[in-house]
Amino acid sequence: MAQKTQQEQLEELSLERDSYKLDAAGAWDKVGTLHAELAFLRKAAAEHDEAQQAEFAVQIARIKAACPPPESPISVNWNMLGKYEEPFQITLRAGVTGEIIIDVMKARSEFLDVALKGGYKFSEKPKPAPAAKENKAVAILKEAGATPQVIAAATQATAHVKPVLEIHAVHMMVEPKPGGKVNVSFFGNDRKHPHNQFADIYVSRSAEQLAKDMAFLDPEVFTGPGEYAVELIVGYTLSDKLNTKGNPYKDIQYIKSA
């Protein structure tokens, strides 16, 4: 084979170099295409994820709207008094499920069992105010068919008149006190015979006034101590003033022989 000339060798090298250049350019073009495709796929994937996330958020919002709020517990409250009468309130809260409700009521029962044994107690409910009693005189007039004018006049006339109550006294105790006053205690027999252990009512007045109030008795009765069997009717009204026990005092209106 004939030996290639230097010129021919140079031309072959130039052609080979150009071929390499073309191959490299094609490779870079292919790499660029792949990068473009990858960017497109990443963008598509991101958009797809965002769409999924948006749809998921919508679903979550719909589910939350259909469910009760996370904090909708049952609440059990009650008031008690401590060992020293100090008031306090107990509160138990839990979610709205049957098992938890049962646990709460069980816990309340166990707490109360320990608290009551330890000297704690429930606060007493205040007693309701008693209803106003109808005036007896007015009630009688109504039953008799009195006119509205008469009933109105009777109501106004007796509006500030307290009802008079009576005690049938069978025993009387007289006790002179320093200063000229004399205490007279009256005993009934509705709880014990021959008379009640404690006085049902008493009065403290001067001997002269007592002699006038009970003119049917010998005035000497009120000059010294003594106990007497009697048959008396003591009429009284309830005072606006209260004693240490919270009961109204009894104001004697009259004393008469039974």
Image (tube, grey):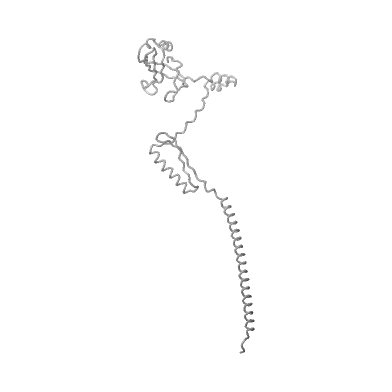
Residue at the bottom extreme, as displayed? 1
- On the image, the x and y values in percent for residue 196 come to 37, 22
- On the image, the x and y values in percent for residue 245 come to 42, 25
- On the image, the x and y values in percent for residue 256 come to 43, 14
Front-most of 54 and 22? 22
* Res 51 → quadrant: bottom right
Total numbered labels placed on residues in the image: 0
Q: Quadrant of the N terminus?
A: bottom right
Front-most of 34 and 72? 34
**Image height check: is 130 above or below 54?**
above
Residue 217 falls left or right of residue 67:
left
**Image height check: is 180 above or below 110?**
above
**Image height check: is 192 above or below 226?**
below
Q: Quadrant of the C terminus?
A: top left
Front-most of 224 and 55? 55
Front-most of 31 and 117? 31
- On the image, the x and y values in percent for residue 32 come to 62, 69
Residue at the front extreme, as displayed? 6
* Res 246 → quadrant: top left
